[in-house]
Amino acid sequence: MKINNNIPALRSLHLLDVTNSALDKTLEKLSSGKRINRAADDAAGLAIAQKMDTQVRGLEIATRNSNDGISLIQTAEGSLTEVHSMLQRIRELCIQASNGTLSADDRDSINNEVVQLKEEIGRIADTTEFNEMKLLNGDIDRRAFSTNSNVADIVAMSDTVNPANYSFEVTQSATKTKDTGGAVTLFDGTGNSTLAGYININGEQIYIESGESSETVFAKIRNLADTAGVNATTVSPFGNSKTITLEAQLFGEKEISVTGDTDLIEGLGLDSVHFNPNTEGEYKKVSNLGISIGALDGDVLVNGIEVNFLNTDTTADILDKLKAKNIPGAEFALDLTGVDSIIVMSTKPLVIEAKTAGAGDVAVAADLSSLASGTALSSSSVRCVPEDNIDTTATILGGVAPAGADIEIMVNGTSAGAYHFAANLDLSIPANLETLVGNLNQLAVPNTTFTLDETGSKLISYNTNGDTVTLVPSDNGDTDDVDAAGFLGYSNSSVSVQTGFGNKGHSIEVNPTNIVFDNPSTAAIEGFPIGTTVTTSGKKIVFEGSEGFQLTLQGGDVPGNVTVNILETGPLDLQIGANEGQFMAIRIQNLSPEALGIEDLNLSTSTLAQDAITIIDKAINTISSVRSKLGAFQNRLEHTIQSLTVASENMIASLSRIEDADMAFEMSEYTKQNVLAQAGTSMLAQANQRPQSILQLLQQ
């Protein structure tokens, strides 16, 4: 027997510690319900369990996201339900307004309701929101921008328009049918009408009473024109010698017809001699040589506008007076190719009349008759931009262009020719400028003619296609080239002109040969799909192609080249999965009245009401298509939620099998370890008592 080391007690203590440790773990599992409470419990199992827990949490959030998406879609679709109802109501009104039994006042009342309905559709498109996010104004469609909104800007696009750059050329901006009549002669000295009769504008008519004041007569004409889809304007106060301008309210090929009692129409200056609103051609005349005023002063009416001339007026004075009057539909410039010639460019034949029967007025009208009867300009001539509107940086600076200098003539940014200065040329000498203009024209730049303004201080380019023409240094690093272009005033400016159509309005025009199409052999999208067609109406441009491709744009005020950039960004992405990239894109196109094409809807005449039916049908189809798409989105999301729920349940079950404790097993372990702990404690006590027997030996 040994006293220094109680080996049985030590062994009992060790085994009791092992049992207590196992008992502690069992108690931890029973109290937490988890098999893995720390990495030491099961390192691999913990890693797997954490991944699964991440997925479960992500699936739960994705389910909530999907429900939020359904709420957003229901908000948008609910608003479109009302838009649908309003469009159906507008269609009913169109059919009602088409009926010939209605009076102008009846259609005006109908039109008032249509105006209110259009405003409400616009309000819904602008204000329908979900979580402060606008839904129907195009904000959750693909981002797009135009490189030149003055030429054309994006309105709406279909879902099949892919991100890319879409380029095309607008050759003519939209115009409205418009003309100004001759001088009014209807009223007596007190300002009252001397005639009575009917006047009819586009099928709508009113009766003018003899003795009515000039204000009353014009108010009747203005209201009549408005009913017929035309704006009537004049210079106040209205009366004799004033003119009436009629302009269609809509862009495009809209005719203006004025009929009625012949004497009344002539008294209002709206007879066919003075008023030609539907002319297609453009009158371009150059006056006979040597135009001047004779021995008498006099006053004349030029297209109904009074101009006063003196017998001392030179050709330059005549030109200045004509330009100062801003005669509607006419522009004037000096023709430097002849002596004292004036170029007239107008939308209708120039009408020059003596203001009175006085000798001076009659004589001056005869002196200026060549303005109306001069030689027609060639078909390649175009309507010029009035010189006052030309960029002042195009003014010739009058320096000396150095010998050896070279300049490039650029048309729409592409070189179309070059000019070499063989010797120094003093640009302050008028004769040198005329020689330079002649030399530039000898280069025969396609569709381009150079000339000087009436002061000889500005170099002007006329291009029959309305292209932008500039003069730039051939070498920006060559000082002589830079100086020569700078002296001509073109180094940092451009002057462009556009062809004219006459008085009749025209829809915007797109050059079909300058549409950039995609190359199917390359992966990148480089333009419009092959087979895309373009249609125009008023200022609206619509490109349509296969697979529902549709790109709608609004034309601007100037022609030119433009590129529409469609970006990837913009659509609303719903995160409907637990991992990166698991999202669903929701796009809702712009559904404003402008995008639906109903902003200019007018039911003031039966003809306009008939046209409106087709427009409304297209708008209804658009809303139906969008609602159908939203319904498909919602159905998909409902299935997505079901799928996410099932995936989450299965993932939780798998996680439970790895992470959760088997309570029955752990209870058995607890019972076992508890019994062992009690036995170990008892044995340790007995082992500690054994050394006591040694004392009995020592007492013996």
Image: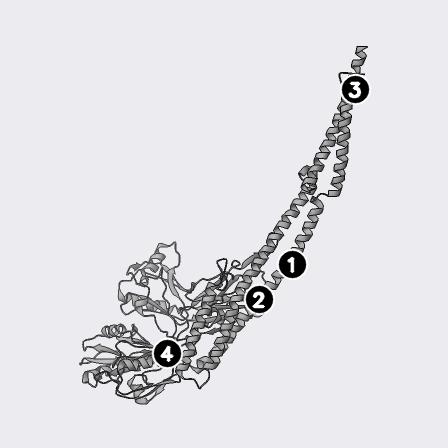
Instruction: Check whether the beta carbons of the residues at disc 3 and disc 1 lie within 8 A of each other.
Output: no
Q: Amino acid at mark 2?
A: Lys
Q: Quadrant of the C terminus?
A: top right
Nearer-the-camera pick, 330 or 318: 330
Q: Amino acid at mark 3?
A: Arg
Q: Quadrant of the N terminus?
A: top right
Image height of 296 relative to 417, above or below: below
Nearer-the-camera pick, 12 or 60: 12
Image height of 91 relative to 391, above or below: below
Tell me if mark 4 has few (under 14), some (14-19) or many (20+) residues whose alpha carbon lies within 10 angstroms of its own.
some
Q: Position of residue 497 (x, y in %)?
A: 37, 70
C-alpha span from label 4 to label 1: 58 Å
- Label 3 or label 1, whichever comes before in sequence order: 1
Q: Quadrant for residue 294, please give it.
A: bottom left
C-alpha span from label 4 to label 3: 124 Å
Numbered label attached to residue 226: 4
Q: Is residue 448 left or right of residue 399?
A: right
Q: Amino acid at mark 1?
A: Gln
Which residue is the site of mark 2? 629
- Label 4 or label 3, whichever comes before in sequence order: 4
Q: Residue at x 69, y 47 (%)?
A: 656
Numbered label attached to residue 690: 3
Tell me the SS state at disc 4.
Answer: helix
Tell me the SS state at disc 1.
Answer: helix
